[in-house]
Image: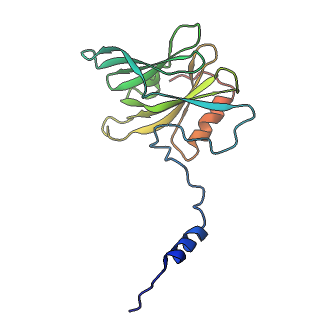
Amino acid sequence: MKAIVLTIPTLILAATCTPPAADTPATDSSTANSPAPVQSAEPAGRQSRYTSLTDCTTTLSKPDEAGYRASDCPGVDGFAVQKIEADGRENLAIQPPKDRSHSLRLPEYGSGGFSALGEQIEWRGEPGASPDALIVRYKVVEKAETPERWTSYLIVASLQATPCVVAKIPPGPHQNDEARRAADDTMRCIAP
């Protein structure tokens, strides 16, 4: 039996000559908790900014009422964000500057199943201007008989006039790009 002996310089040379992996996604969109960094060219004049949904301050807690908890989370350009948790479901309320708070009614888009928000909000808009859309990951248990299986959607919401959901992007290899296209397009509110 012959033994193959490779020296360290040979291994380094082999590693540097190995071609890069073919276009593999940075994250698995079916399980990721947040939008992936932009990998394709941005539409002219559009940009993304991010805020956390984990760095929030609890403002109201009623554990005896289906585990109700409301938390204030960071927003951008005067937009206030409230994360609401109750009965195993999560929701967002967005308060535009100088306006009242508007619930996005996310549990209705998840067919009423248990749900959880991702870790951040992606705010979309023109550079130097307030955002006109947001994108958030929304994981939902769609079948009661398999509560361990979550489906990870991206929810796109318009911030123009009254904040509302304009798209629910299903899991797929280009989920993040599809959500950004929806956020950068003409936005019309959709029913749950």
Q: Position of residue 96 (x, y in %)?
A: 57, 13
Q: Position of residue 22 (x, y in %)?
A: 60, 60
From what the image shows, is residue 106 above or below residue 26? above
- Taking the spot 56% from the left edge, 73% from the top edge, the residue there is 14
Left or right of 183 on screen, residue 10: left
Left or right of 125 on screen, residue 100: left
- Taking the spot 54% from the left edge, 77% from the top edge, the residue there is 10
Towards the viewer: 139 or 52 = 52
Residue that protrudes farthest toward the bottom in the picture? 1
Number of numbered labels in the structure image: 0
Q: Position of residue 38 (x, y in %)?
A: 62, 41
Towards the viewer: 162 or 12 = 12
From what the image shows, is residue 112 above or below residue 139? above
- Taking the spot 57% from the left edge, 21% from the top edge, the residue there is 76
Residue 163 figure quarter: top right
Left or right of 9 on screen, residue 114: left
Towards the viewer: 33 or 169 = 33
Towards the viewer: 21 or 8 = 8
